[in-house]
Amino acid sequence: MATEEIKAAPRQHAYSGPAMPQLPEPSHAERVRTLLSMGAVGMLSTVSRKHPGFPFGSLMPYALDTLGRPLLLISNMAMHTQNLKAEPQVSLFVSATAADGDPLGAARATLVGRAESVPSEDLAAAREQYLARHENSRYWVDFADFGFFRVELVDIYYVGGFGVMGWVEAAEYARASPDPLAGAAAGILAHMNADHVDSMLLLAKRHAGIEASEAAMTGVDRLGFSLRLKTADGMKGARINFLREVATAGETRAVLVEMVRQG
């Protein structure tokens, strides 16, 4: 499987507590590829022509090419298009929907790069990739004043929730693949939080050594899951790894049942 696991946390900061054991988990690069692959709309910031030096934000649908570079279909009449044609430096901010309703706990990423017209030899592929994500764009994709732009990435900043953040090199992001469990993750979280709180409390005690009175699963991926736990000492987070890597909802259910049944 062409994915990477993070063994340490280079280019990361903001955690000042005692050293924690480093469990295998998807790299920040894989998490960003997953986040971008599951989304379709972000906030594009361009450099304002009217107010030089000031950022100008625009709601922006996007798609991804095979290297994960954002593809934009934009009109020449749009202010953001006029801005980026004058100064191509842009950023695209994309955020996940918070599973627990807290937007500051949701994963998000800011992609920094230069917006450039898609070269003619890549236009057919860009058109196909964009329309696969935005079917309604067929109504205006061929209008003369619309064109495809691609963000050539320079750097990426990822925030995975409270205390989880760091820079991701553009080359590392391009090499990563989305998590295979991404499409099923929302359903797994909803099911576990609705029907299996007792099991999560048991797993928190057994695998993380945390006694809790309340538990919520806030994230799940091919290697494990994250819990938010209410304890006598306040709220705590825990990462628990699966016994083996999973790729489907069925495999996830099987390994969770196995973990709960372990003596």
Image (cartoon, grey):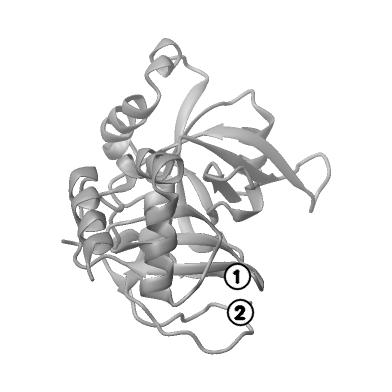
Residue type beneath disc 2: Tyr
Give the camera-side residue of 159 and 176.
159
| Residue at (26% x, 34% y) in the render | 125
Contact, mark 1 vs mark 2 (Cβ under 8 Å): yes
Q: Residue furthest right?
A: 51
Q: Is residue 209 above or below residue 239?
A: below
Query: Can you see residue 23?
Result: yes
Q: Left or right of 3: which side holds 142?
A: right
Query: Residue 47 at x, y = what percent?
Result: 71, 47
Q: Is residue 120 above or below residue 109?
A: above
Which residue, given by chain and number where applicable, does mark 1 sit on?
163
Which quarter of the rendered picture does the C terminus lie within?
bottom left
Which residue, given by chain and number where applicable, does mark 2 sit on?
15
Rounded to the nearest angstrom, the CA distance separating label 1 from label 2 is: 6 Å
Q: Is residue 260 above or below residue 263?
A: above
Which picture quadrant has residue 118? top left
Q: Secondary structure at mark 1?
A: loop
Q: Residue furthest bottom?
A: 19
Residue type beneath disc 1: Gly
Give the camera-side residue of 9 and 263.
263
Other-residue count near label 1 (Cα within 10 Å), few / some / many at <14 / 14–19 / ≥20: few
Q: Is residue 57 above or below residue 34?
A: above
Give the camera-side residue of 236 and 146.
236
Query: Residue 215 at x, y = what percent?
Result: 51, 56
Which quarter of the rendered picture does the N terminus lie within?
bottom left
Q: Left or right of 47: which side holds 253?
A: left
| Residue at (34% x, 24% y) in the render | 131
Which picture quadrant has residue 76? top right
Give the camera-side residue of 61 and 3.
3
| Residue at (60% x, 50% y) in the render | 90
